[in-house]
Image (spheres, rainbow, N blue to C red):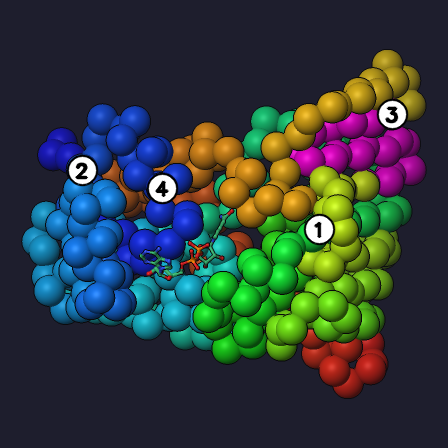
Amino acid sequence: MAKIGVGIIGTGSIVNIYLKCLSEMDDVEVIGLCTKSADRVAKVKSEFGLPVFSDYASFLALPEMDLVCVCNESGMHSEAIQAAAKEGKHILSEKPLEVTTEKIDNLISFCEQQKVILGCVLQNRCSSDYKKVEQAVKSGVLGKLLMGNASINWYRSEAYYSKSEWRGTIELDGGAAFINQGIHTIDLLINLMGSVDSVFANVQTRVHKIEGEDVGVALVNYANGAMGTITAGTALFPGYPERIEVYGEKGSVIMEGGKIIDWNIKGEEHVKIDIDRMESGAADPKAIGYQNHKTVLQDMIGAIKRNKKPMVDGVEARKSVALINAIYKSSRIKKQVQL
Ligand SMILES: NC(=O)c1ccc[n+]([C@@H]2O[C@H](COP(=O)([O-])OP(=O)(O)OC[C@H]3O[C@@H](n4cnc5c(N)ncnc54)[C@H](O)[C@@H]3O)[C@@H](O)[C@H]2O)c1
């Protein structure tokens, strides 16, 4: 089969990860990049050595392009995805798929109508430690699930926000700590614990000069009767590795910085691991590896070749955004919100 042609919309910090992953894959060819600012074309061209476009129309008209990776500002994913879908291109979007469930619902139905595959990058689902936990929880070895907690108590500098036109804004980031930084861990938590029934939350902007929250706490009731808390922040100096705790009737598992640090199930050997250095974006947004992105890209290419669902489709990507939107709503109205 001919190589899958790939184009990328957005040329910010995440694009280097895509180019590294794609350069290691034999069955793809990167066709070009698209940046919304015409002033940036020359700079981006010299930086990446690839054809660069500043308008969707000429970029998406390239016939050899099969897949568009959407890597622009989160609240602008819709316009990029719709433009690509209109041209019959398959789409792999960065997280969050969009910043509200209303926008995500429109995208899901539009892509269905256009008969293109829509995938979303929630790459932490590919981590081998996470998969071990998922297998244990889903096989029932933890017994009845009682509690599922997550903390993403991170730190971002003032410059992280002040140098960006979109981060921390409601329109383009959808909020801040929960939807931008917390979403990966929240996605894993609800994938382990099952759907959420209701949430009561309080989020606040305490330190940074942004519209979105930099500290927040949510009390979660899962549909299976378990409960839990989610805390998130980007003002919590120095920033600690994100953590997931799953407590069941027969045992518990704790992950930190993407690694299992405590595995204690009745009848099994207790495994406790001290990890010095973990790959976590706790204090540095660039401290993410690229291997999981590569697995997501390989999965998407496989989905296109075999015309099947990608690992995280629109419906899966909607779940974490629905919970985060409900957390924000609960905090706004100061009441429990039913999902
Ligand atoms: N999956 C992950 O772990 C992960 C990590 C980081 C970002 N993201 C997502 O990727 C999307 C983009 O995030 P980002 O961190 O790349 O944003 P960014 O602020 O670095 O870039 C945003 C946009 O601004 C433009 N831009 C910014 N700086 C530029 C430069 N020096 N040269 C040319 N163009 C430039 C680009 O067009 C880009 O689309 C967001 O949706 C974000 O949530 C995901």
C-alpha span from label 3 to label 2:
46 Å
Give the residue drawn at x 56%, y 64%: 161
Answer with left or right where residue 52 lies relative to residue 253. Answer: left
Answer with left or right where residue 61 lies relative to residue 179. Answer: left
Give the residue drawn at x 74%, y 35%: 256
Picture layout, residue 63 above or below residue 251: below
Residue that badge 2 annotates: 29
- Mark 3 vs mark 4: in front: 4
Residue that badge 4 annotates: 16
**Callout 3, which amino acid?**
Asn
Residue 154 shows which numbered tag?
Answer: 1
Magenta region's main secondary structure? strand
Picture layout, residue 192 above or below residue 22: below
**Callout 2, which amino acid?**
Glu
Q: Earlier in the sequence, mark 4 or mark 1?
A: 4
Out of 275 and 96, give the one closest to the viewer. 275
- Mark 1 vs mark 3: in front: 1
Does the beta carbon at disc 4 come under 8 Å from ligand 1? no
Out of 328 and 54, give the one closest to the viewer. 54
Give the residue drawn at x 9%, y 55%: 62
Q: Secondary structure at mark 1?
A: loop
